[in-house]
Amino acid sequence: MNNELIDFVLVSVALLGIGIYGLSVKRNAIRMLFAVEIIINAANLNLVAFGRFIPNSGGQTLALFSIAIAAAEVAVGLSLIIVAYRMYQNIDIADFRSLKG
Amino acid sequence: MADATFLALSVITIGSAIAALEMRSLIYGSIALMGTLGGIAGFFLLLDSPFVAMFQLAVYVGSIAVLILFTVMLVKRELIFKKIEDKRRKFVGIALMLVFMIALGSIIMDSGIKSITTTEPAVDFRNIGADFLTYYWPALILMALILTGSVTGALVLARREDVEDEQRTD
């Protein structure tokens, strides 16, 4: 193992920063979903990295559960975006302020 | 010290994460997101966890990215290429990102994890399978129920009620 734990953690911090930037700047709903995905992946990377360096199988198990839950989250999020797009004909989240049918 | 594979992977991952958020077209953006997810799978391979890497490839690159791509194609053409953001907000966002990165990075660099290395062998993925079937089985069943519920909920949400079913009977 040539790499140290700190390298992986720093990559994960960089991904977290990019995700926070995307969540705070973008107003496109699909782009915000991209940012959420990037943050979730940074968390998974941290889990697996710490699990490798302890070493313990718990990190990998938790990462697997996290990936599966993220899949469910994306399915629901995308269908919400489609419903909102059908209502407002737009994917700008500033338009979703009055969420009524 | 990090080796060349690690550096290449981190450049690919971080670069395509920025590209996913900044590309003009949402379609290219989602393809760049695929690059980020694949890069994370590469990191998992570097961390000697091939099982999680394959899961990541199958679930993220294989299904989530394709799902996002199809959703993007359902949106109007003008909206795919339109950038909706204002300048001031963007600078504040970049400042927030830099503050987060520098603060968290310096905290981590000062902490004890800087010196952690390992010479121990990696966890065998057979142990993970055994864990799943012995210790974690209630969580596995719960996860299956959550997945079923969320996919059903997504189908119900995205269903159009104004379109009648036109099933042929003859």
Image: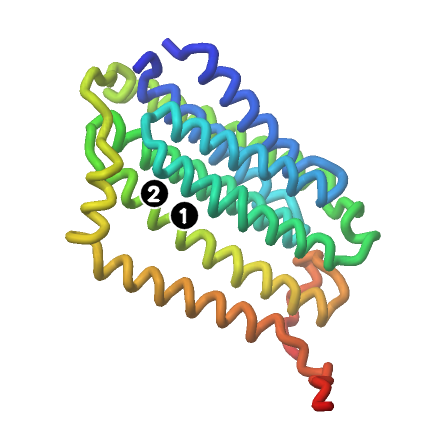
User: The N terminus of chain B appears in which quarter of the rendering?
Assistant: top left
Residue drawn at 35 percent across, 15 percent down: A3
Q: Position of residue B167 (x, y in %)?
A: 70, 85
Residue holding disc 1: A67
CB under 8 Å between callouts 2 and 1? yes
The chain holding disc 1 is A
Residue B148, visible in the rendered structure: yes
Quarter of the figure with residue B3: top left
Q: Residue type at mark 1: give it.
A: Ile
Q: Position of residue B30 (x, y in %)?
A: 65, 42
Q: Nearer the viewer, residue B151 or B127?
A: B127
Q: Position of residue A44 (x, y in %)?
A: 38, 39
Residue drawn at 47 percent across, 44 percent down: B58
User: In screen coordinates, is A12 left or right of A3?
Assistant: right
Residue holding disc 2: A63
Q: Position of residue A32 (x, y in %)?
A: 59, 49
The chain holding disc 2 is A
Q: Residue type at mark 2: give it.
A: Ala
Residue drawn at 56 percent across, 24 percent down: B12
Label 2 Cα neighbours within 10 Å, binned few <14 / some 14-19 / many ≥20: many
Residue drawn at 28 percent across, 44 percent down: A61
User: The C terminus of chain B appears in which quarter of the rendering?
Assistant: bottom right
Residue found at the very far left of the displayed protein: B135
SS at badge 1: helix
For residue A15, the mark is none
